[in-house]
Amino acid sequence: MSLRLKLLLLGLATLVLPWAGCRYAREMESALRDGERDSLQGVAQTIAASLQGRTDLMYRQSLPRAPAENAEGGGPEPPAAPAAQRPTDPDDFRRGPYDLEPLTLAAAPPLDGYIDDWPHEAAAWQSFAHDDAHQFSILTGVHERMLYVLLDVHDQHPVFDAGGNNTLDPQTFGDRVWLAFEDPQGEQQRVLLAASAPGPFVARRIVTGEYRRQSVVFEPRIRGAWRPGGAGYRLEVRVPLSMLGNAFGVLVDDRDVRGGPAVSYGTLRSDDLHTMGRLILASPELGGYLAQFLQPGLRLAVATPQGRVLAHAEALAGPASLDSGPPLLARLYRRFVDTPGERQVVQARAPIYDRDREVVVGTLEATQTADRWIRLRDRALTRMLNLTVFTSLVVVTAMFAFAAWLALRLSRLRRASESALTRSGLVTSFPETRARDELGDVARSFGTLLSRLDEYTQYLRTLAAKLAHEIRTPLTIVRSSLDNLESEQVPASARAYLERARQGSERLGTILLAMGAATRVEESIANAERVRFDLVPVLSSAVAAYRTAFPQRSFQFECGAGSMPLTGAPDLIVQLLDKLIDNAVDFSPPGASITVRLREEGTAAVIEVDNPGPALPLHLQGRVFESLWQSRPGSGADVHLGLGLYIVRLIAEFHGGDASAGNLADGTGVRMVVRLRRQAIDGP
Amino acid sequence: MKRLVAIVEDEPAIRDNYAAAFAREGYAVRAFANRSEAMAAFAARLPDMAVIDISLQDEPEGGFELCRQLRALSAELPIIFLTARDSELDAVSGLRLGADDFLTKDLSLPHLTARVNALFRRVEALRRPNTPADVLRRGPLTLDTERMQALWDGQVVLLSLTEFWIVHALARHPGHVRNRQQLMDAASVVLDDNTITSHVKRIRRKFQALAPSFDALQTVYGMGYRWVE
């Protein structure tokens, strides 16, 4: 794992900031929500208090108990005492078995007998049964001054009216439905709903005219539709609220055959069609009354104690919510913060009491949509997350950059130390040594180490020359003594020893010469003159000479160019080639073919010497040109101090080039490559 | 009367060996260990030849100074530097100071005495002008082997003994390549390749000082040198 990656991962730890931010935002949100709930509760209680005792404001009619309990006599109802004058009866606000609580419809359902147009509220259905075979369900709803009634009647044998004009003839009676209600004046009204075919119909009213003669008239204000469906048929009826008073009821006359006996059941007394249930409706003013309390995003509703909503008022969330919604970033953030499925609303309920605070006459429900605090939270969240994400990004970027910089410095250091090792000494400047941090310390100690190594290498390099010089004097003593001994009378038996001593001193002399060779080359390099000359004839003549000098090897000279002008010292070049050839001869078997190749490479002249023989181990390839480096197998009388290729390097460097060693591609031998700059350079 | 050879050498063993060798050759020998001793003796009587080491006891360059002082006393006195040093710079300095030859101590005693003998011959030959000389002529080059003197177009080219013998070895068979070993043998010296190269360069420079267009001494790369007429 690279340093860069490690620091990058470390930088990612700053992502804990946004995470903490989310946590904070969530806590803030719940605090906000609590506050909102409290204030909403306050609002709800205030409104509920303002409605205390105002049943007239809440309900369309005052709600005396329906006449079901006391109207045994069937006579006209005594007018209900005004609510203000009598104590509130808790029963008035409890739903009786026959009371109907219409839904508040969002839209008018078309009069077609289908239930699909109605809200799917199973709880709103009320069922009335005579027995298992005779029952119906009723759903009522109010929309804009109209009462809608949906009847779902179970009837295994629906029977139509015979139709025609003679509606009063019992023989024509099919299944009939009676609607009975009080009109606003408290008068009992009843209408007859009968259909002679599926489809729309108009309610009819039986009018008793003069001489108690009964006649049937159409009641065009009440219309409906009949449709077979369910376990029998369905009726959908519309009644204007203006016709209606407090009470409302339905009676179904179920006949199995036309004109047959009817099974009557419903919310009316079947004998006189008096209603038994009330129609519990909101006062028309209630909606307007609630509207004055509205705030953006607030929904207020007044419900009956049973929970049926009488009226509600709703305000849009406010102009702010009309913009294009939360910005993309905020929406993204919200996905991290919101727990899915969490309700985005706050609700508060407050009971509405009667004047004496004894009876609950209704419930006020206040609902605040979440928009308001969500927006607040989003703004804070977005700002904070932006900040923390930005911070994280900055930190990660900075860490990455720092890591990259560190890695760069380290790799520079590594490269420098590597090349310092391979290029034996001569390191004068080391990178990073001026840095004041730990890397600088490392670099400095590296530098110190290398300069000591350099000193040591220098010492080694001069050691040979110094030794040669020091040994020369005693050697001269030995030689001159031997020379003098030659002139003396030496017994023949001692001649052999004398000869051996001479041979030994000769070898010592050769060694001395070899030891001083590098120094002398350095000297002659220092004194060398650069001239412009052609490399091709120099090399070809030298190669020709090697053929004579080393008859055991064959030499090839390959040169593409006809001439290759070079600025340098031809003597030194030949000396360089001598050393390379010496090396090639020593490492190749007798009879081997040694190839000298001259080619041009950009501004450089490249001399290559290929010889078959053992491959050069990889770890030696950079070192063979070092001073005193020797990898020759045991040498005989020839003296090799590992200076030959070092001299090659010195001469190559004098020509602004370098020397390198490698193996041939097919592994059959070694290739030495010397690169010479063809233009003159300043200084050795 | 025996010729007097003065040896100035701080290493007693070498000094004594050289003295013995010169004495065997029939020379009178006086040996000195340092410059002041030598100069004191030379002030009284000049030797016929001086063989001087460069570093003398506590004077690393004492031989050069001695050479300068001797030259001031006598312009003809043959002086040979014999030193353990073999640096090019020392050789150049020594020869520039007027030494007749610059030899390293690698030289064997017979070679050394041969050199000394040759130098004496040269001195004698120079003192006897107009004697018919053993002369080798190659174009503008005239080599007087008796006096060990080289002339180019009649002008004397001041060569050291080693240089003279190198030129002689090359010019005797013009066009033939002489490798370094052959040149060393001819000059009776043991030198390494670089020293031969610098000798040849010095020779060229001396000829070019007289004739800028001189290019009779050619390098045959990888093999050696040859004289071209």
Image: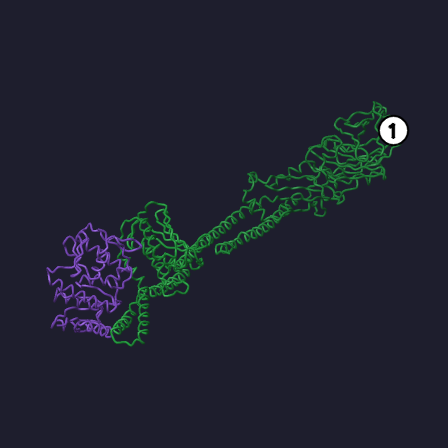
Secondary structure beneath disc 1?
A: loop
Q: Position of residue B202 (x, y in %)?
A: 22, 57
Residue A520, by quadrant, is bottom left
User: What amino acid type is highlighted by mark number 1?
Assistant: Arg
Colour of chain A as rendered:
green
- Give the residue at mark 1: A258
Residue B108 vs A543, above or below: the answer is: below
Residue A267, by quadrant, is top right
Left of A418 or right of it: where is B174? Answer: left
Colour of chain B as rendered:
purple
- Total numbered labels: 1
Residue A266 vs A468, above or below: the answer is: above
Residue A444 vs A135, above or below: the answer is: below
Left of B215 or right of it: where is A501? Answer: right
Instruction: Name the one closer to the observer, A148 or A448.
Output: A448
Left of A68 or right of it: where is B2? Answer: left
Chain ID at mark 1: A
**The C terminus of chain A - image quarter:** bottom left
Q: Position of residue A163 (x, y in %)?
A: 83, 24
Q: Position of residue A514 (x, y in %)?
A: 32, 64
Instruction: Name the one closer to the observer, A168 or A3.
Output: A3
